[in-house]
C-alpha cells in the first residue's frame, strides 16, 4: 500500500518506522530539518509530490492544532479513493469534518506518547479505534496495532472524548496543581522527584494539546470529582480524624486495586 504520513515529528516518525518496510511510504513535512533522520521512505516538501505519489492511505500526524488545516491543504492532491486518517488525541470537530470531506476515513488514538512510553515495548499500552469510520481502514489499523502488541478498544467519537476526559484530564489537572504549588527542594524525596519528572514530561507537551484536552466538554465533570475528593480529604486532615483517614486510605487502595 502507498501510505503518506503528514508530519515528521515523533509520532509521524514512529509510524514511518512501523510501516516503511512493508509498504511504500512517503512523508510530507514543511520543515526540511525534520526530514534529516527519516529513512527508507520518500520525503516530500511540496504538494505536487503528493499528487504524483497517489497515496492510498494518509496518516495525519501533525500537531493537533493543525490536524484539520493539514487535511484541507492536501485533500485537493489526493486520489478520490484515498482513505484519510488521524491519530489525534483530541477529536474535536473531526467527526463533522470527515462527514463532509467526501473521502473514506478512519480515526484512531494511540493512548501513549513519546514522552513516557517505551516505543519498543508497547505491550502494556492501549489504542482506541473509532468505530464510525471506514471498515477496511479500521481493519488496517487493528492489524497494525495488534502486531506491535497494543491493547485495542473500539469507541465512538463521543465515547472516545469521554474516555480522554477521564484518562488524560485527571492526571493533567493533578500535575498542574502539583506544579503550581511546589517549591524548590534542596533534598527532595523519591516521591517528589517522581512527581517532578511526570510534571516536566506533561508540560513538555504542546500548549494547544493541553488546552484542547482540558477544554473537552466532559472535563469539568472530572475536575468536580477532584474538588469533591480534595474537600473530603481536607476535612479529615483539619479534624485530625484518624478513623476517617483510615477509611479514606482503604477506599483509595480498593479503587487502585480495581483499576490494575
Image: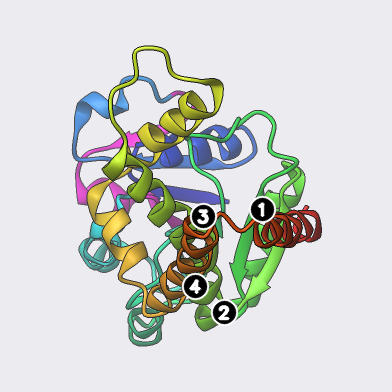
Query: Tag 2, which secondary structure?
Result: helix
Span of residues in magenta: 39-61
Q: Is residue 98 left or right of residue 67?
A: right
Residue at 69% in and 58% down: 252
Q: How many marks?
A: 4
Q: Which mark is residue 237?
A: 3
Residue at 59% in and 42% down: 23
Q: Disc 2 versus disc 3: distance between alpha carbons?
A: 37 Å
Q: Disc 1 versus disc 2: distance between alpha carbons?
A: 15 Å
Is residue 69 in the magenta section? no
Query: Tag 3, which secondary structure?
Result: helix
Q: Disc 1 versus disc 4: distance between alpha carbons?
A: 24 Å
> Could you classify mark 4 by the number of other residues whose Cα lies within 10 Å: few (under 14), some (14-19), or many (20 or more)?
few
Between label 1 and label 3, give the one nearer the viewer.
3
Between label 3 and label 4, give the one nearer the viewer.
3
Residue at 33% in and 80% down: 97
Q: What residue sits right under mark 1 in the picture?
A: 126
Residue placed most toward the observer, 63 or 29 = 63
Of the numbered discs 1 and 3, the one sitting upstream in the chain is: 1
Q: What residue sits right under mark 4 in the picture?
A: 225
Q: Is residue 56 visible?
A: no
Q: Is residue 152 left or right of residue 111?
A: right
> Could you classify mark 2 by the number of other residues whose Cα lies within 10 Å: few (under 14), some (14-19), or many (20 or more)?
few
Q: Position of residue 157 (x, y in %)?
A: 51, 79
Amino acid at each position: 500500500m502507498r501510505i503518506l504520513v503528514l508530519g515528521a515529528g515523533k509520532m509521524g516518525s514512529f509510524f514511518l518506522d512501523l510501516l516503511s518496510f512493508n509498504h511504500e511510504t512517503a512523508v510530507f513535512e514543511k520543515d526540511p530539518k525534520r526530514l534529516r533522520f527519516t529513512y527508507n521512505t520518500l520525503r516530500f516538501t511540496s504538494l505536487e509530490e503528493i499528487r504524483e505519489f497517489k497515496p492510498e492511505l494518509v496518516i495525519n500526524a501533525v500537531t493537533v492544532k493543525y490536524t484539520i488545516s493539514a487535511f484541507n491543504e492536501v485533500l485537493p492532491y489526493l486520489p478520490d479513493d484515498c482513505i484519510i486518517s488521524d491519530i489525534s488525541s483530541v477529536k474535536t470537530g473531526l467527526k463533522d469534518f470527515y462527514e463532509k470531506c467526501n473521502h473514506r476515513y478512519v480515526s484512531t488514538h494511540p493512548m501513549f506518547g513519546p514522552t513516557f512510553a517505551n516505543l519498543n515495548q508497547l505491550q502494556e499500552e492501549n489504542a482506541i479505534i473509532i468505530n464510525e469510520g471506514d471498515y477496511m481502514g479500521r481493519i488496517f489499523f487493528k492489524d497494525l496495532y495488534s502486531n506491535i502488541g497494543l491493547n485495542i478498544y473500539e469507541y465512538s467519537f463521543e465515547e472516545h472524548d469521554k474516555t480522554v476526559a477521564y484518562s488524560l484530564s485527571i492526571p493533567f489537572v493533578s500535575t498542574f496543581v502539583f506544579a503550581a504549588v511546589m517549591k524548590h527542594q534542596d533534598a527532595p524525596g523519591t516521591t517528589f522527584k517522581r512527581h517532578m519528572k511526570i510534571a516536566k514530561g506533561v508540560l513538555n507537551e504542546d500548549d494547544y494539546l493541553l488546552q484542547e484536552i482540558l477544554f473537552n466538554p466532559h472535563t469539568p465533570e472530572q475536575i468536580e470529582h477532584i474538588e469533591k475528593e480534595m474537600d473530603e480529604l481536607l476535612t479529615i486532615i483539619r479534624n485530625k480524624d484518624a478513623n476517617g483517614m483510615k477509611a479514606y486510605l482503604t477506599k483509595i487502595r480498593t479503587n487502585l486495586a480495581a483499576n490494575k
